[in-house]
Image (spheres, helix red, strand yellow):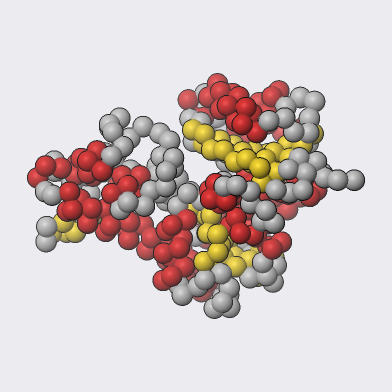
Amino acid sequence: MAPEAAVGWDLGGAHLKAARLGPEGRVERVVQLPCPLWRGLAHLDQALTRAQAVMGPAPLHGVTMTGEMVDLFPTRAEGVVQLVAAMQQRFRGTSLRFYAGLDGFVAADEAKTSTSRVASTNWLASATLVAACMQDALLLDIGSTTTDLVLVRSGRIQARGRDDAGRLATGELVYSGVVRTPVMALATAVPFEDELVPLMAELFATAADVHRLCDRLPEDADQYPAADGGEKTEIGSARRLARMIGRDAETAPLDAWRQLARALARAQAARIEDACDRLLSSQPLATDAPLVAAGVGRFLAADVAHRLARPCLEFARLLPDPGPEPGRASDCAPAVAVAWLVQRELG
């Protein structure tokens, strides 16, 4: 019996991601939409309506999530329950399953009673696909808000942490991304005009401003208003970055703000590289084992791979047919992975 078309859903706290795989496993469509879940479930409902219009109908749906972490919910468990219920209501009459990590997929009722198995497992979906395709690799998924690091050896996932708390402690989850991370979280001080200047602990600018000034921010990666609500241009980013050191953008040429942005980008990459070094020091990989780059910040992953002297392989290249937009498949790796996994398990 031929496999059915499947849609994978990644319910994040700030974005909704979805990917549709055709019956032969081809990635037909991928979409990422802003979804400020912390403001209420109505935003999820609106984003799902928009995404469904792109994905089209499908008999099979796989869901993973990190959105249970937002402060809309009193506990992570309650977040899982409410998100599962929202998907149940939306996808009545379809085969709807929730990713429970190493336990595979579970039905909605079981997901509601086993919330710890379902919460924040999207990284494991991506890693499972990598492990099915590669014997040895380091998955580095750099998104808008966080970075996931997962070692694969001999076709097996070598994760020491399983939940967010454990993964933070082991360095397998780094809370740094290329769009939403406040600049004050990238460094404590920056070089500027021959001085080492402390950064202000204010949300004047974000990583999107940094990478925009470095001319590396992917198109459509920055889906939320800027910190000051202003324009998303080099001038706007320079103005916001200048505030971080108590200046106005007009007090220095644009090239000075670009240089400051490059210093901050290097600081961010160094933190991620340090996390990679930590993992590789405890569980070495062969020198030719690649770094698999995923997420909208995979341009930073390529930098890290270069410094680690490892080949860099885009996540989408692991897929039999990444479709017309392989870049988007790499951007939304967990959504693609959960569609691939649910199709293999239930399709």
All told, the count of numbered labels is: 0
User: At x 74% / y 33%, what residue is drawn?
Assistant: 58
Say above or below: 137 vs 27: below
- Residue extending farthest to the top is 42
State left or right for residue 256 relative to residue 183. Answer: left
Is any part of residue 135 visible from this angle?
Answer: yes
Task: From this view, report whether residue 302 is shown above or below residue 242.
Answer: below
Residue at image point 53% right, 50% down: 327
Is 85 on the left-hand or right-hand side of 216?
right
Quadrant for the C terminus, please. Answer: top right
Rendered residue at 16%/56% (across/down): 192
The residue at the far left in this view is 251
115 or 259: which is nearer to us? 259
Q: Quadrant of residue 42?
A: top right
Residue 220: x %, y % from top left:
44, 40
Q: Residue shown at 33%/56% (left/top)?
A: 265
Residue 187 in the image: x percent, y percent? Answer: 29, 54
Q: Quadrant of the N terminus?
A: top right
Q: Position of residue 249 (x, y in %)?
A: 15, 42
Q: Is residue 71 visible?
A: no
Q: Position of residue 226 (x, y in %)?
A: 33, 35
